[in-house]
Image: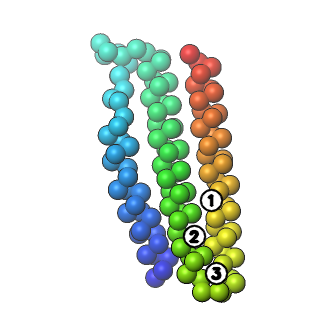
Amino acid sequence: MQRLTDTLLSLLITLSALPARVLALEVPSIPGLAAGDGVDGIKDTIVAIVVIVLDFVLLLAVVYVIIAGIRLIVSGGDDGQKDTAKKTIYYVIAGIIVVLLARVIVSFVAGLFE
């Protein structure tokens, strides 16, 4: 039951922040139309989608760090629960580092094609 509650809470928090990020995007130009600019428009659209996905993963990671922190506080001295919460925090931090490196790689590769 606790896992279901945690999952629903993280889903609710994630979905509540998603519309603000989506509404902040510019509408990409469509190649072949008057405002389209060909391959650059496609590249920019792909880069924007990848960045949005990486931002979404970072948001989920922050939510999981918060949930693991709450589990660590509420563990009540149980060493098993404390170790599980600490491992979760370590793994999520490692994931955040990987996602940030992915953003750097995407920015670098996108810059090569300009």
Of 35 and 26, nearer the camera is 26
Q: 87 above or below 106?
A: below
Specify the label residue 112 is tagged with.
Answer: none
What is the spatial separation of the Cα atoms under label 2 and label 3, in whole angstroms?
A: 10 Å
Mark 2 is on which residue type?
Ala
* Quadrant that contains the C terminus: top right
Within 10 Å of disc 2 (Cα), the crowding (few <14, some 14-19, many 20+) is: many
Mark 3 is on which residue type?
Gln
Percent from the top left, x then y, of residue 55?
Answer: 50, 45
Indicate which disc, 2 or 3, sits on the residue closer to the N terminus: 2
Specify the label residue 81 is tagged with.
Answer: 3
Percent from the top left, x then y, of residue 93?
Answer: 65, 56
Within 10 Å of disc 3 (Cα), the crowding (few <14, some 14-19, many 20+) is: some
Mark 1 is on which residue type?
Val
Disc 3 secondary structure class: helix
Q: Is residue 85 left or right of residue 11?
A: right
Contact? badges 2 and 1 (CB < 8 Å): yes
Image point (47%, 72%), residue name: 6
Contact? badges 1 and 3 (CB < 8 Å): no
Disc 1 secondary structure class: helix
**Which residue is labeled 1 in the image?**
92
Percent from the top left, x then y, of residue 82?
Answer: 66, 78
Q: Is residue 97 left or right of residue 40?
A: right
Image point (44%, 64%), residue name: 10
Q: 93 above or below 2?
A: above
Q: 4 above or below 40?
A: below
